[in-house]
Image (tube, rainbow, N blue to C red):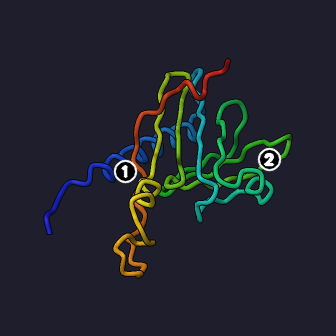
């Protein structure tokens, strides 16, 4: 079997490390200047921990904002926890880095988007695993790749 360089996975790890470092510094020292973050994540990820009422309201994805009020921001190798205020009701959230879809800091026009190739793969196959044998021997889902995201989505009109 030919050995290659998995640039997509390497990029994913690097971008995850960047977000981990940024959130760790913010957890220790607070947000500097006008920095703030829009973080969109997959609420269906099995390791996401949010209140049931939030999961019901956001069944597929949710965007949180770390700006004016947040508490208990703690970061580890796999993700972060933070307490946010929803209508004067503090709610703790646990978000694994693998659940991230976007990370944007509009104050400096910086953004990342993590995408999966699962949707593309599903369109190209005839049966569940694409080899026409009726078996289910699919490899695990591809890791999300990172790319720069357009900030127009997060601009206020």
Quarter of the image where one finds residue 50:
bottom right
Asked if residue 52 lies left or right of residue 105, the reply is right
Q: Nearer the viewer, mark 2 or mark 1?
A: 1
Residue under the image location 54 percent in, 29 percent down:
105
Give residue 90's mark. Answer: 2
In this rendered view, identify the residue nearer to me: 2 or 64: 2
Residue under the image location 43 percent in, 63 percent down:
141
Q: Tag 2's secondary structure?
A: strand
Residue under the image location 41 percent in, 68 percent down:
126
Q: Quadrant of the N terminus?
A: bottom left
Instruction: Please state the horizontal and vertical placement of residue 46, each as a whole percent of the image.
Output: 59, 65
Q: How many marks?
A: 2
Residue under the image location 73 percent in, 44 percent down:
84
Q: Tag 1's secondary structure?
A: helix
Of the two numbered discs 2 and 1 on the same chain, state the one appearing first in sequence.
Answer: 1
Instruction: Please state the horizontal and vertical placement of residue 9, each as a whole percent of the image.
Output: 33, 53
Instruction: Please state the horizontal and vertical placement of residue 62, each as a whole percent of the image.
Output: 66, 46
Quarter of the image where one finds residue 137:
bottom left
**Dot 1, crowdedness within 10 Å: few (<14), some or many (≥20)?**
some
Asked if residue 126 lies left or right of residue 155, the reply is left
Q: Residue furthest top?
A: 157
Give the spatial CA distance, label 2 vs label 1.
Answer: 31 Å
Q: Which residue is mark 1?
A: 13
Instruction: Please state the horizontal and vertical placement of residue 35, each as a whole percent of the image.
Output: 57, 26
């Amino acid at each position: 079997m030919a050995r290659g360089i998995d640039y997509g996975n390497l990029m994913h790890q690097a971008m995850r490390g960047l977000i981990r470092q940024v959130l760790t510094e913010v957890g220790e020292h607070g947000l500097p200047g006008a920095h703030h973050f829009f973080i969109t994540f997959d609420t269906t990820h099995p390791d996401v921990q949010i209140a049931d009422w939030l999961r019901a309201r956001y069944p597929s994805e949710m965007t949180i904002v770390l700006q004016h009020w947040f508490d208990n921001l703690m970061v580890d190798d796999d993700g972060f926890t933070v307490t946010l205020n929803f209508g004067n009701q503090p709610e703790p959230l646990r978000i694994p880095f693998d659940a991230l879809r976007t990370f944007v800091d509009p104050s400096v026009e910086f953004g990342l988007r993590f995408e999966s190739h699962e949707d593309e793969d599903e369109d190209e196959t005839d049966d569940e695993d694409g080899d026409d044998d009726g078996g289910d021997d699919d490899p695990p889902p591809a890791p999300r790749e990172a790319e720069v995201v357009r900030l127009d989505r997060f601009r206020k009109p």
